[in-house]
Image (cartoon, grey):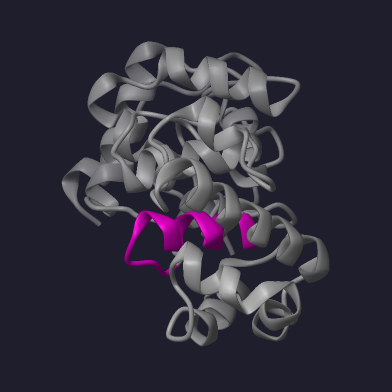
Amino acid sequence: MSTTMLRTAAPARRGAAMTRAEVQEMFERLRELNPHPTTELEYSTPFELLIAVVLSAQATDVGVNKATRRLYPVANTPEAILALGEDGLKPYISTIGLFNAKAKNVIATCRLLVERYASEVPRDRIALEALPGVGRKTANVVLNTAFGEPTMAVDTHIFRVSNRTGLAPGKDVRAVEDRLMKVVPKDFMQDAHHWLILHGRYVCKARKPDCPQCVIHDLCRFKDKTLPN
């Protein structure tokens, strides 16, 4: 572990939100651990990312990647997926949860992209959220990952990490998103949601967080930390 990782802070105050200095330290450590974080969804164009994120609702990235590895070599544009139709699309995504509803949304989204946006993914939140199957979180992922916008896509991992650590406590995902936009330093905003998702997925896990291996354990407010073996 690097010298940066070994830096310690004053004992964290249980239940209190992180201080500005602690937030800065947190993201410095996460950046040192992973300088170039990105989504684990596989894509090569904004459209492929959009469809992958739509398919990822209540599904794992691993499961979505398995499906898109079959789908994208056959159809990876709005026109090509429209040509498949719902019945033609379903066999490619049938291993993903809620695939019937997702197939309907994907086809409807592809139709709107062709008819309104010349088959291009719009770089606009309102336009994105008007697409079937696209909510605020999906729009934020696309804006951030495909277009480099400083947005915060709050999923269950980010919601958990933000509340446990004291980084951005909130009762719902929108409250957490709004607070994160205020407290995350500008220099870290572009990559912050990737760091937080990965931290929640692999370290600050829901059932048994791996606190002994956590690089921010001394900054964290979580009162039920797991103890070293």
- Residue 40: percent from the left, percent from the top? 44, 64
Main SS, magenta residues: helix
Q: Quadrant of the N terminus?
A: bottom left
Residue 94: in magenta span? no
Marker count (numbered): 0
Image: 125 above or below 43: above
- Residue 169: percent from the left, percent from the top? 63, 20
Seen from the viewer's position, the closer of residues 62 and 118 is 118
Q: Identify the residue at horizontal 67%, vertical 78% (top origin).
A: 89
- Does the image show residue 2? yes
Q: Magenta residues, as a range?
A: 42-56
Q: Identify the residue at horizontal 53%, vertical 37% (top origin).
A: 128
- Does the image show residue 56? no
Residue 48: in magenta span? yes
Where is residue 108, by image quadrant? bottom right
In the picture provided, is 82 more to the left or to the right than 105?
left
- Residue 31: percent from the left, percent from the top? 26, 44
- Residue 164: percent from the left, percent from the top? 63, 33
Q: Identify the residue at horizontal 72%, vertical 66% (top origin).
A: 103
**Furthest-front residue in this view:** 115
Q: Identify the residue at horizontal 47%, vertical 31% (top origin).
A: 152
In the picture provided, is 9 more to the left or to the right than 160?
left
Image: 143 above or below 145: above
Q: Quadrant of the C terminus?
A: bottom right
Seen from the viewer's position, the closer of residues 65 and 109 is 109
Where is residue 136, by image quadrant? top right
In the picture provided, is 14 more to the left or to the right than 46?
right
